Image (cartoon, rainbow, N blue to C red):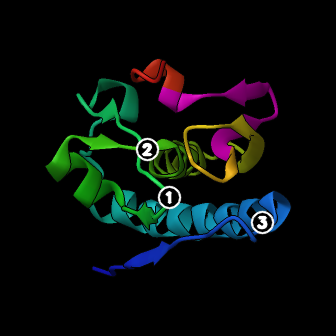
């Protein structure tokens, strides 16, 4: 099986649209990895029934595939969205990541990011479904 280990961080000089673009690209790449995981592990539970919960990361983004997320029992928005996108692809549905940024004092950068899943039927938010406030 393949494994991808990627992390990136940013600081107050990083433009939110640049960070969003990198995040979107990484989520798409992780979704491809997750699709391969599902092909090799077809009995993987669906994200909604997996017992996994949302848990935020701070400043440094780690990108975890389904296997890691299952083993740790939690993940943040980009990991959850990459899993959900792979599920949809595995079922022959179109889906892609959507990254938004918003004002936030919690990050110390003045903004935060959030990833959602776009389908032909609308926007899904796996993080909200799995415990994000």
- Give percent across and percent down for residue 24: 70, 61
N-term-proximal mark, 3 vs 2: 3
22, 30: nearer the viewer:
22
Task: Point out the residue furthest to the left here.
Answer: 71
Residue 21 magenta: no
- Residue 118 falls in image quadrant: top right
Task: Find residue 16 and name its label.
Answer: none
Q: Quadrant of the N terminus?
A: bottom left
Give coordinates of residue 119: x percent, y percent.
Answer: 75, 36
Give whichever of discs 1 and 3 has the lower sequence position: 3
User: For the magenta stretch, what is the residue range?
Assistant: 112-127
Residue neighbourhood size for the residue with mark 3, other residues' Cα within 10 Å, grouped as few (<14), some (14–19), many (≥20):
some
Q: Is residue 76 above or below residue 49?
A: below
Residue at (33% x, 79% y) in the render: 3
SS label for mark 1: loop
- Give the label on residue 21, or none: 3
Query: x, y percentage for residue 127?
Result: 49, 30
The number of discs equals 3
Q: Is residue 114 magenta?
A: yes
Q: CA distance from mark 1 to mark 2?
A: 12 Å
Q: What residue sits right under mark 2 in the picture?
A: 76
Residues marked 1 and 2 touching at CB (< 8 Å):
no
Label 3 to label 2, Cα distance in Å? 17 Å
**Along the horizontal axis of the image, is 21 left or right of 49?**
right
- On residue 59, the disc is 1
């Amino acid at each position: 099986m393949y494994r991808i280990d990627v992390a990136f961080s940013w600081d107050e000089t990083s433009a939110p649209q640049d960070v969003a673009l990198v995040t979107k690209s990484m989520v798409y790449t992780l979704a491809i990895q997750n699709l391969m995981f599902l092909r090799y592990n077809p009995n993987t539970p669906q994200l909604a029934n997996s017992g996994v919960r949302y848990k935020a990361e701070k400043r440094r983004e780690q990108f975890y595939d389904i296997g890691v997320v299952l083993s740790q029992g939690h993940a943040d928005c980009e990991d959850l969205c990459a899993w959900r996108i792979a599920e949809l692809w595995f079922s022959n549905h179109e889906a892609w990541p959507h990254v938004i940024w918003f004002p936030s004092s919690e990050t110390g950068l003045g903004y935060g990011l959030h990833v959602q899943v776009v389908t032909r039927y609308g926007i899904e938010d796996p993080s909200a479904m799995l415990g994000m406030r």
